[in-house]
Amino acid sequence: MYRPGSVWTWAFLLVTFIQAAIVLAFEGYVFGIFEESLTDASRNPNNQGAYTKTIPTFLTLYIFGLLYQLVLVWDALRMKNTIQIIGLCAYDIGLLIYAGVQINELQAASDSLTSLSNPDLWQDITPFLTAIPCVLALGLILMTLVAWKLYDEFAWTIYKHISADLKMKRRYLTFQVYIALLKFDFFFFLGFTIQFVVVVVDPTDPEFGLTVAAIPVTIAVLVMAAYWTRRENKAGMSFTIFIYFAALAYFVFKMVRMYYGAKQDPYVPVRKTLTTFAVITIILIVVTIANAIMCTMNFNKGLKRHIAHRKVESEDEKAHMTEMPNLSHGPVPSRMTID
């Protein structure tokens, strides 16, 4: 089990943990108050009852996002992955934006829902909803400062294990960026799909079954994308890039459908949150496609042996498993895994 071994790794872990603990407590309170305020009349579909599905889905997904962030923080520190640390700061910006959208969504829900058991619902939850972006903003500032220190600290590990060849360093950097992107893609792909399935699609609609089936397929594609990159499988990467372009077309189509056409009405209660997820996901897909192409172009140029082989001399060395080995004396037989 990994334990931080320096002041700055402990600092990054504690900042993100305390931030998550505070925000989770506030989110849990808001979730509980909202659910207690609902009555049978307020759940009536003819009485803006869609909000009774959108808000719990929204809050649950946000809570999952905070917990997933902690997993990524532990993973990044364990692997001493500077790229992922920087990505987590960007991820925190996404949570901050989502917290702002959350305020508008809950206000719209409290204004639209009638027959609530607690008519003062909005007044009760406003202080907590306002505090969440403040906590996230402070956490983001602290995370950025600590990340800067970690960049210097992890530079020594990179120096020890990466080749002196500048071209090889760039290839490995591209690989690291791509692997980190896949981890963030997972959350935003999953988040959009879950909201779409729970709120928008009618369970009797064939699109419902297709969308549900797309969830395990998406996870499988992301896992295989990492596998094919490590193995330098051009056929697999070509298939993956094709899937990325198909996903990009799908999200652009959904964005247009949310605002134009005869089928835009079901999207109205969740339009803001879906738009937020769709925009972030589209940006991630574009960046992921670019990195996937760059990784494919780097195949058969010597990177594979650096990734696949490394001597692990001690338990402490296992913390550096994502870093590139020094093969100045030739490759060694031990295998290395990259999360």
Image: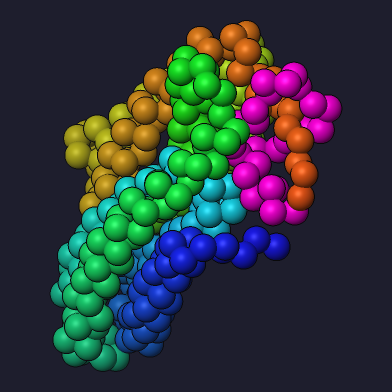
The reply to whether residue 274 is in sight is no
Residue 91 appears at what percent x and percent y? 36, 51
As rendered, which of 42 and 155 lies closer to the eye?
155
From the image, give the main secondary structure of the stretch colored magenta.
Answer: loop
- Give the residue at the far right of this rendering: 333
Rendered-image quadrant of the C terminus: top right
Q: Residue at x 19, y 90 (%)?
A: 120
Query: Quarter-wise, where is residue 217 in the image?
Result: top right
Rendered-image quadrant of the N terminus: bottom right
Q: Residue at x 29, y 91 (%)?
A: 117
- With 199 as the anchor, is 226 left or right in this view? right
Picture layout, residue 34 above or below residue 171: below
Residue 200 appears at what percent x and percent y? 38, 50
In magenta segment, residue 219:
no
The reply to whether residue 194 is in sight is yes
Query: Quarter-wise, where is residue 17 in the image?
Result: bottom left
As rendered, which of 91 and 83 lies closer to the eye?
83
Residue 169 appears at what percent x and percent y? 49, 23
Residue 187 appears at what percent x and percent y? 47, 48
For the magenta stretch, what is the residue range? Answer: 315-339
In magenta segment, residue 320:
yes
Q: Residue at x 66, y 15 (%)?
A: 233
Q: How is the image coloured?
A: rainbow
As rendered, which of 39 and 243 lies closer to the eye?
243
Q: Residue at x 25, y 61 (%)?
A: 141
- With 183 as the anchor, is 255 left or right in this view? left
Query: Quarter-wise, where is residue 30 in the image?
Result: bottom left
